[in-house]
Structure formats: structure tokens, C-alpha cells
Image (tube, coloured by chain):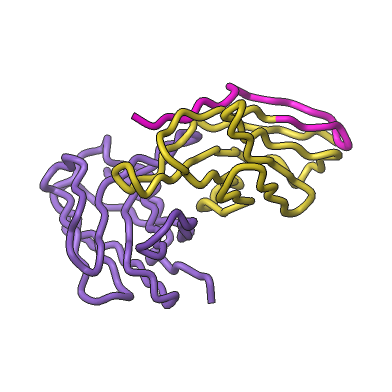
Amino acid sequence: GDSVTQMEGPVTLSEEAFLTINCTYTATGYPSLFWYVQYPGEGLQLLLKATKADDKGSNKGFEATYRKETTSFHLEKGSVQVSDSAVYFCALFNAGNNRKLIWGLGTSLAVNP
Amino acid sequence: DTEVTQTPKHLVMGMTNKKSLKCEQHMGHRAMYWYKQKAKKPPELMFVYSYEKLSINESVPSRFSPECPNSSLLNLHLHALQPEDSALYLCASRHFGGNTEAFFGQGTRLTVV
């Protein structure tokens, strides 16, 4: 079945450092890919999305490109802030397969001033 | 309006109590979801409603009883819960067709004592 593999955390960075969180997937057909973020004590927020190969999703300085050849959707940000401290989840949705969101295990990010 | 509203935000209940969680959206989404989430883990799917009909039950114990009274509302009735049921309960909604994103509420933090 479909699956998402996400780099394990926790990740600890200093403010203004470069961030990469790796995400790879296995899926049949043409899934959509998402990054969700969960700040402490809150629900899940959609950070960015991509619906087809070579799409680049971007929001709040974060970017991820849907790479079908490497089955990847890595999250990047050029300069992190303390306020980016959160748990980040990579997910895919494939209407052709059970219509369920498939989640990575999540990566906890802590940014120190 | 891209909001999913959940009430209450916090709930403490005894093992013999009956309580209900509520979820509301006005985005015209015809797929609605209940998830259970433990700290820093990905959400676990519990139930899916499609066009107000229960389409997926992920073998959830009968002490959890979902209800979808109309296309905007989703309830989760709780009865005789166990301490291990303490978690964040998240509601989500999305358009039924295609591979579109899901929108999440802020969740109800449930503690069973």
C-alpha cells in the first residue's frame, strides 16, 4: 500500500539556519502531497501542498517540490525562526487508494535563539 | 471561511460519564473525519463520513460513537472511556472528489480520569 517515510527527529537548529526535512513516498497513481505543521498545543495546519509532479508548494518561507523521479517531497526553509518550532508531518492523499491521508511519523523541530 | 470549529477545546471526564465532541464546517465539504492523536505522533484515523454516511470505521471500540446530523456537523459521542483514550481528538473535512487537502480543527484535548 501507499506509504510515507519521513526523517526522524528531533531536529535542533539555531535561528537563521537552513532547514531540510526529508520525505519520500511510495504510491500508485498520482497522489497529492502535503506538509502539515502542528505548533505546541494546537491542531494541524496545512503548510503547503503539491498536486502533480514538478509542482512546487510554498508558504511562510517554506518550500517543497513534488519529485516523481525520486518519489520525494523534501521541506526546506532558508532561514528558520524560533516561531518555526513545531512538529512537521509529510502526508499523501491518493483518491485511487482507500481515500485516506497517509502520514509520515512527524519531525519535531526546535529552533534556539 | 476555511475554518473547522471544534468544541469543547478541553474535556475531563470520568470513566462512567457520557460526553460528546462537536465539529462544524461551512466550506461545503462532504467528507468529514475523526482522528485521534497522541503527543508528537501522526493522527490515527477513526471514522470517515462521505455525504453524511459512515464510509470508514477503523475498527474503533464501540465506546466511541460517531454521528453526522447534516452536511456541516459531525459529533463524536463518548461513553465508558478508559484512561488510555486520553488524547487530542481532531476533526477534519475536505471536498469529496479529487486529491484535495484536508482542513483540521484545533482539536479537543480529552483527559479520562
Residue A109 placed where, x, y %?
67, 33
- Looking at the image, which is closer to me, B111 or A73? A73
Locate residue A39, reporting x and y percent. 61, 47
Is B107 on the left or on the right of B15, as rendered?
right
* Quadrant in the rendering for residue B5: bottom left
Please tell me which residue lies in front, B55 or B25. Answer: B55
Q: Residue furthest top?
A: A8
| Residue found at x 26% / y 54% | B48
Asked whether A41 or A92 is in front, the reply is: A92
Say if A108 sits above or below B31 in the image.
Answer: above
Residue B3 highlighted magenta (yes or no): no
Q: Is residue A32 left or right of residue B43?
A: right
Which chain is tinted yellow? A
Q: Which chain is purple?
A: B
Residue B12 is situated, as x and y percent measured from the top left of the image, at 32, 53
Q: Quadrant of the N terminus of chain A?
A: top left
Question: Which quadrant of the structure image shows residue A68?
Answer: top right
Left or right: A83 with respect to A101?
Answer: right
Q: Residue at x 18, y 42 (%)?
A: B60
Figure quadrant of the C terminus of chain A: top right
User: In the figure, residue A111 lies in which quadrant?
Assistant: top right
Furthest-right residue in view? A16
Where is residue B13? Give x, y as percent: 26, 52
Q: Residue at x 26, y 46 (%)?
A: B46
Figure check: A112 above or below A100: above
Answer left or right for A51 relative to A94: right
Write the start and end of the magenta stretch as one range: A1-20
